[in-house]
Image (spheres, grey):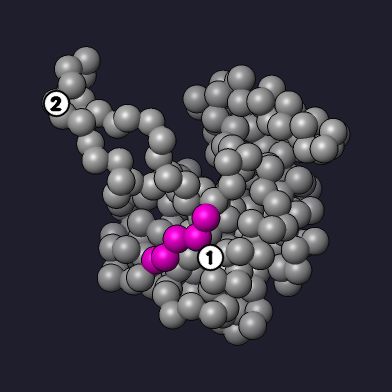
């Protein structure tokens, strides 16, 4: 089964204060760390979307950049992984977990997720409306795997609407998405302090 991957490195990084894909982490820019892991995990081809060496132009929104990557994937590729360059600490083990679930399962998408440990509140401004039952809530990560054909179809529906991840687009057209265990170290670089945390995590792994 052919599996390609799209690494998204075209974001503006507004919450961080600027683009993040070229940030140095352990001697490599964030996007290269992701590409290296995906290639070493046996992914057939990795497409990078963003202003990097060998990358292709992205779009104004996340879904536009995914669509740009999808346009480069042959119809013969059955599954595609979508991964955010802002998650540079993915491991071959996590990639294998997602890919294996895609190979043996009957769903249209596979996403890694973690149980939520914090108490969650539904709020209106600074007023708490109620406490949310966290037992049915999961925090989602990337890489996420999808049937290429179905993901193409999902991107054609309501193109003006945005989505925070591609699983949301698959859900909109009635596709099935299953979860596999995520990785606590697979953090997303969103705010400035996150890069320092990632550096400490790398050092901790090297010291083990």
The one of 6 and 49 positioned closer to us in this rendering: 6
Q: How far from the left and from the top, in percent, is residue 154?
A: 37, 67
Residue 145's disc is: 1
Reading the chain from its start, which is encountered first: label 2 or label 1? 2
Q: Residue at x 39, y 47 (%)?
A: 138
Assess disc 1: are there few (<14), some (14-19) or many (≥20) residues with their C-alpha within 10 Å of its C-alpha: many
Q: In the picture, residue 73 is in which quadrant?
A: bottom right
For residue 131, above or below residue 140: above
The one of 17 and 109 positioned closer to us in this rendering: 109
Q: In the picture, residue 143 is in which quadrant?
A: bottom right
Q: Residue at x 68, y 42 (%)?
A: 88
Say whether marks 2 and 1 touch (CB < 8 Å): no
Q: How far from the left and from the top, in percent, is residue 86?
A: 61, 39
Q: Residue at x 41, y 35 (%)?
A: 117
Q: CA distance from mark 2 to mark 1?
A: 35 Å
Label 1 element class? strand
Residue at the far left in the pictured view: 129
Which region is colored magenta?
177-181
Q: How far from the left and from the top, in percent, is residue 192?
A: 60, 20
* Residue 50, magenta (yes or no): no
The residue under label 2 is: 129
Q: Which numbered mark, 2 or 1, is in the foreground of this view?
A: 2
- Kindly report the secondary structure that dominates the magenta region of the rendered protein: strand
Q: Is residue 200 left or right of residue 76?
A: right
Quadrant location of the C terminus in the rendered image: top right
The one of 207 and 174 positioned closer to us in this rendering: 207
């Amino acid at each position: 089964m052919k599996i390609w991957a799209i690494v998204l490195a075209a974001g503006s990084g507004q919450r961080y204060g600027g683009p993040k894909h070229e940030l140095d982490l352990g001697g490599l820019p964030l996007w290269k760390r992701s590409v290296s892991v995906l290639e070493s995990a046996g992914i057939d081809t990795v497409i990078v979307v963003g202003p990097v060496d060998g990358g292709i132009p992205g779009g104004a929104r996340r879904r536009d950049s995914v669509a740009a990557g999808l346009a480069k994937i042959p119809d013969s590729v059955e599954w595609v992984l979508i991964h955010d360059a802002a998650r540079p600490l993915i491991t071959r083990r996590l990639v294998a977990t997602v890919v294996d679930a895609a190979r043996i399962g009957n769903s249209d998408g596979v996403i890694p997720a973690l149980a939520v440990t914090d108490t969650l509140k539904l709020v209106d401004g600074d007023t708490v409306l109620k406490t949310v039952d966290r037992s049915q809530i999961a925090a989602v990560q990337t890489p996420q795997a999808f049937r290429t054909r179905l993901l193409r179809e999902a991107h054609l529906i309501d193109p003006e609407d945005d989505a925070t991840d591609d699983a949301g687009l698959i859900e909109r057209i009635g596709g099935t998405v299953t979860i596999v265990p995520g990785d606590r170290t697979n953090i997303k670089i969103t705010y400035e302090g996150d890069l320092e945390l990632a550096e400490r995590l790398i050092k901790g792994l090297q010291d083990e």
